[in-house]
Image (spheres, rainbow, N blue to C red):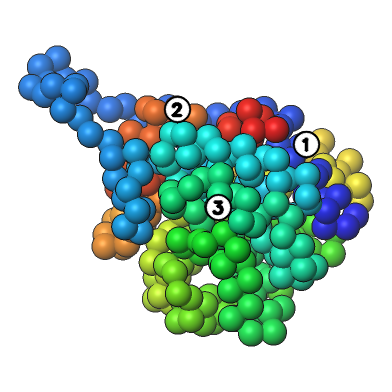
Amino acid sequence: MDNISRKLGHIESALDQEPSASCFDSIRLKHRSLPNVSLNQIVLDTQFFDKPTSAPFFVSSMTGGPSESERINRHLAEACNELRIAMGVGSQRITIQDGEASGLNWSVRHAIGDLPLFANFGAVNLPHLKAVQELGRILDPIEADALIIHLNPMQEVFQPNGDTDWRDIICHISEVCEWSPVPVVVKEVGFGLDLNSSKELVSAGVEILDVAGTGGTRFADIEIELNKNISEILSKNDVFDNWGYTTTECLINISRALPSTTCWASGGIRNGLDVAKSMCLDASAVGIAGRVLLPAT
């Protein structure tokens, strides 16, 4: 299966996934019968990298690659423009490897206007770059305000011909942090950032951690479904259903051990109440992906 077919398969499978049980249901916010505040005085406006937005909320990275994703990214960008919120694009690997903009180009920047827009590239693909400066080819076309580097070891394991050599990846991330003209964000893809990795990333110069915990889109399930060599065995046994860390676990662990580190929350965010709970767990911003994919198609 080539990259384009696989990316299209990701979109179709993500749309078919049933929601998982939520870690946020175990958290209850304190009710105040006498709040002593006016609702009209509550302001959600914030900033991402010195750019104002209407809320500490963003559309998280989803789909990149095939030209068919242009419509999805454009619709998402248009919605973000109307709501005045930030957005992260999907993986831009194909832009560098195959020379295709694949919908992740100036059209997305034009649709979102002057709002924050984040580029995206896979950590395991960094060693394949001829030079780290090649990342300029994904930053410049969309005038990116930040660069998201995603970590997806579990996803790669189940991909046919996936990239499974993660040795010294932290060194490549450190090099990106030294070179990048924009802030670097590192995110998981639905299995949660563990504490040891978080410490390494902060030491390497990463400015923001997006924990991307379990409970949202399950990319391992998607890859298993697309990989016919293993789908019949693993999909029936639900072997990796409980693998990883929930978004709430990640936020609690990182805020305790790395209190000065800026964290974003994503993974299983269903509604505004989950956003509020994430903020109470020290997330500075909250992202959602899978739940806005269907309306964007």
Tell me which numbered mark, 3 or 2, is placed earlier along the sequence: 3
Spatial CA span between label 3 and label 2: 26 Å
Residue drawn at x 72%, y 65% as measured from the top left: 95
The amino acid type of the residue labelled 2 equals Asn
Tell me which numbered mark, 3 or 1, is placed earlier along the sequence: 1
Callout 1: SS:
helix
What residue would you read off at disc 3? Answer: 109
The amino acid type of the residue labelled 1 equals Glu
Spatial CA span between label 1 and label 2: 23 Å
Residue 185's place in the image compared with 228, above or below, is below
Residue 96 image label: none
Whole-percent x and y of residue 212?
51, 49
Whole-percent x and y of residue 241?
66, 40
CA neighbours of label 3 inside 10 A, class few (<14), some (14 to 19), many (20+)? many
Task: Please state which of residues 264 and 153 is positioned toward the viewer in this rendering.
Answer: 264
The amino acid type of the residue labelled 3 equals Arg
Residue 56's place in the image compared with 161, above or below, is above
Callout 3: SS:
helix
What residue would you read off at disc 1? Answer: 12
What residue would you read off at disc 2? Answer: 271
Examine the rendering and report whether any part of residue 147 can be seen.
yes
* Contact between labelled residues 1 and 3, with CB atoms less than 8 Å apart: no
CA neighbours of label 1 inside 10 A, class few (<14), some (14 to 19), many (20+)? few
Whole-percent x and y of residue 140?
56, 67
Apparent side of residue 120 relative to residue 15 in the rendered image (left or right) = left
Tell me which numbered mark, 1 or 2, is placed earlier along the sequence: 1
Spatial CA span between label 3 and label 1: 25 Å
